[in-house]
Amino acid sequence: MKMIGVIGAGSCNNEVYELAREVGVGIAKMGTILVCGGLGGVMEGACRGAFEAGGQTVGILPGHDRTHANPYVTIPIVTDLGHARNVLIIRSSDLLIAISGGYGTLSEIGIALKLGKPVIGLSTWPNIKGIQYVATAEEALNAALASG
Amino acid sequence: MKMIGVIGAGSCNNEVYELAREVGVGIAKMGTILVCGGLGGVMEGACRGAFEAGGQTVGILPGHDRTHANPYVTIPIVTDLGHARNVLIIRSSDLLIAISGGYGTLSEIGIALKLGKPVIGLSTWPNIKGIQYVATAEEALNAALASG
Amino acid sequence: MKMIGVIGAGSCNNEVYELAREVGVGIAKMGTILVCGGLGGVMEGACRGAFEAGGQTVGILPGHDRTHANPYVTIPIVTDLGHARNVLIIRSSDLLIAISGGYGTLSEIGIALKLGKPVIGLSTWPNIKGIQYVATAEEALNAALASG
Amino acid sequence: MKMIGVIGAGSCNNEVYELAREVGVGIAKMGTILVCGGLGGVMEGACRGAFEAGGQTVGILPGHDRTHANPYVTIPIVTDLGHARNVLIIRSSDLLIAISGGYGTLSEIGIALKLGKPVIGLSTWPNIKGIQYVATAEEALNAALASG
């Protein structure tokens, strides 16, 4: 496995942020590159965890300004494609970990399952057939390892 | 209201096809342009209904070949963007009618609700907050008229 | 031939605008759909000519707001893709007529020639191998007819 | 300066390949990330040079298959956007070095100049206002350093 995508809410409470951060740490420790949308909330939490653990973090940004990336993105990709950039996050990832999230995350889950990518769900949209639901960051990371 | 998007399964049984066709007829009779992904199943049913009622049908195609459009598309848009073209269907529509559908439709529902577009659901993904669920083509068309 | 693209400067002097308008009239009279970027300058001139002659005009817009289309666009496609939407104009057209234009037009000419689409040039970037250069709107329309 | 894009022909002779490779070495030695389209020819030459000098190389791929990246891409971005991905290469780069190249490169030069990004040209499309033409890889790298 080369790249793991983390998708989730662009703004979130501290608990969800720390969950994302823990997932990010684990991704970096696997030696895997983290891919995300490059902005705040879950994206920032995950990037921060990975960054602080010495990992690489790709942020595929919707806008035209690199400085909108969170400070823990090491590889910013500037798309200016708006929400269409969601597809690139999914396409570039071997599997996705969805953490919390609203309608944008729902659209990413839809694309991921359409493309047959494994989706591991943590406190995210319930009752979607195809998502492997887990309860903790550790379980998410174990599921990622097992699927790869 | 200028353009109504119809989203749904790319292949479907005859009952769903006829449902989509009935919706297409209604959209054309409103004098509104139908927007869809331009392929088969629900997309073809809807285009066919609109086309046979004298309406305009825009097909925003994922591939690079115009001939992949169903025969009832009057305005084919060739994107070669793959699933990223889903966002264009949503962006170009004033409201969406979702009929049946799988993961691709789920991703379109997510984008539509993210962008604050009304989504009318007919035999589609259940229990998604924000979708206005209806039971018949007629109810879908009435809901579209009411929201416009 | 089903669709002809007109590419060119987003703002232009009156002479170039009238040239584009004359081309637009001719496209509509061929019974062909006009495709363009949907904004001002050459795009507006061409749409206006086609619209006033009773034709259909597709405007593939870079932004997220349909109201940014010029008033002569009958089929607005809202992409929110920025300059990436240029590729869709080329992909959707059977041939391109380039009128005047700056760097954006140059990028569209590049994509068109890359994809093997005929490009007819009118007061546009000189000395590009592959462009069929003409001197008047009438010559451009005749060249379009001959190629199709 | 954080990221430098290298654009050019997807297949090329050995001389151009070595030119691109020399440019890639220099980009890595600056501590800058190399961005390109991720495929063969100039893209591969540049990635190889950067990779062999220990640098990071981003390949923004047009297709849906990561394995189509050349073997020297360390960060593959899978877009499935076809030629529309060209815009992302330009958007993600602080400046561009164009080496040789055909119509695809011409389209990238157009987008780059449209967006006001510096373009350094090496054996590429001649006589385009806005390109800073140089004669050697060393001059290209010096021009990049000077502009940053």
Image: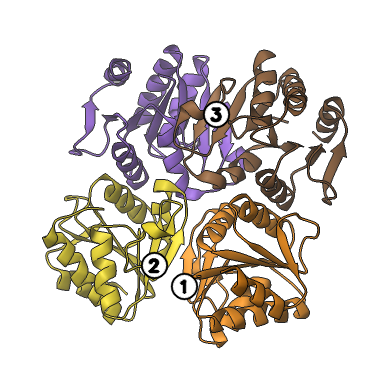
Chain colours: A purple, B yellow, C orange, D brown
Q: Badge 3 is on which residue?
A: A73
Q: Local crowd at mark 3 within 10 Å, few (<14), some, or many (≥20)?
A: many
Q: Residue furthest front?
A: C146
Disc 1 to disc 2: CB gap under 8 Å:
yes
- The chain containing the residue under callout 2 comes to B
Q: Using the numbered discs, state the Cα–Cα distance from disc 2 to disc 3 in whole angstroms.
A: 39 Å
Mark 2 sits on what residue? Answer: B58
Q: Which subunit holds the residue at mark 3?
A: A
Q: Amino acid at mark 1?
A: Ile
Q: Is residue B129 left or right of residue D15?
A: left
Picture coordinates of residue B115, whole percent (x, y): 39, 56
Mark closer to the observer (1, 3)? 1
Element type where label 3 sits in the image: loop
Q: Mark 1 and mark 3, same subunit?
A: no
Q: Which residue is mark 1?
A: C75
Q: Is residue B111 visible?
A: yes
